[in-house]
Image (cartoon, helix red, strand yellow):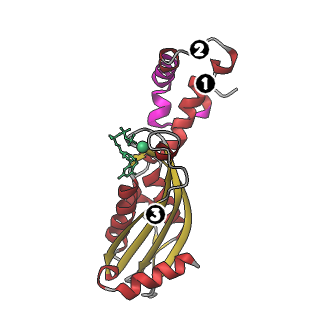
Amino acid sequence: MAGAKDYVNSQVGRNREQIEFHVREILKLVGENVEREGLLETPARVTRMYEEIFAGYEVDPREVLGVTFDEQHEELVIVKDIVYYSQCEHHMAPFFGKAHIGYIPSGKIAGLSKLARLVEAVSRRLQVQERITSQIADILDEVLQAHGVMVVVEGEHLCMCARGVKKPGSKTVTSAVRGQFRQSSALRAEFLGLIKQ
Ligand SMILES: Nc1nc2c(ncn2[C@@H]2O[C@H](COP(=O)(O)OP(=O)(O)OP(=O)(O)O)[C@@H](O)[C@H]2O)c(=O)[nH]1
Ligand SMILES: [Zn+2]
């Protein structure tokens, strides 16, 4: 059984007692018996889960790209199929999928893992898919001063599958382009071709 020691020094960890209290209250309000065995640990489990799925609040996404390298590779760099999990800010329901990032460096390259860390930092919080997409593009553009950035994010939203309009399998695709990608349809086509391979 997990205890307070499992928490890191996060907003959720610091507020764990209050979060557990409110989860327990919600369970009561939806008609559950919070004393039954299966639910005894649920408020603590939910709180620990929140610490993971809201871990992005602990990170400044710009700082994730703090380490860069000087390199004269002024050609397309792509990291694709970066899996992300996020929470829709309208329903607090999960949405998840893959992010594909491409950029053309202008003398500064990012460590490849830092691109995945950037995706984690912006997705592990309450979000909409459009904002995840544009935040990744804007932060890369700003920190790397790249010649161009293109980001495509694919997502499946449980708020559209499990409830509401109930359309499981529907996919949302969002894109953001900055710099040279705005001007060049050939560059956009190259990026799209490479992420489909
Ligand atoms: N644009 C956008 N919309 C989202 C995202 N995640 C969820 N939504 C939508 O947010 C909208 C919220 O609409 P509301 O009418 O306020 O809420 P609702 O009555 O629960 O809507 P329904 O889902 O249609 O039942 C819904 O259309 C969701 O599909 C997202 O990442 N981007
Ligand atoms: Zn939703």
Instruction: Residue at 37% x, 83% y: name it.
Output: 106
| x and y percentages locating residue 111 in the rendered image | 51, 71
Label 1 vs label 3: CA separation?
32 Å
Describe the element under mark 3 as helix, strand or loop.
strand
Judge left or right: residue 90 versus residue 7: left
Q: Are marks 2 and 1 in contact (CB under 8 Å)?
A: yes
Amino acid tagged 2: Val
Residue 42 in the image: above or below residue 171? above
Label 2 vs label 1: CA separation?
9 Å
Is residue 16 in the magenta section?
Answer: yes
Earlier in the chain: of badge 1 and badge 3, it is: 1
Instruction: Residue at 34% x, 73% y: name it.
Output: 177
Earlier in the chain: of badge 2 and badge 1, it is: 2
- In this rendering, does residue 85 appear at all? no
| x and y percentages locating residue 188 in the rendered image | 40, 81
Describe the element under mark 2 as helix, strand or loop.
loop
The residue identified by callout 2 is 34
Amino acid tagged 3: Val
The residue identified by callout 3 is 153
Give me the disc on residue 42. Answer: 1
| x and y percentages locating residue 13 in the rendered image | 50, 32
Judge left or right: residue 187 versus residue 157: left
Quadrant for residue 107, please give it: bottom left
Label 3 vs label 2: CA separation?
39 Å
Is residue 52 in the magenta section?
Answer: no
Describe the element under mark 1 as helix, strand or loop.
helix
Q: Main secondary structure of the magenta part?
A: helix
Query: Callout 1: few (<14), some (14-19), or many (20+) C-alpha neighbours within 10 Å?
Result: some
Amino acid tagged 1: Thr
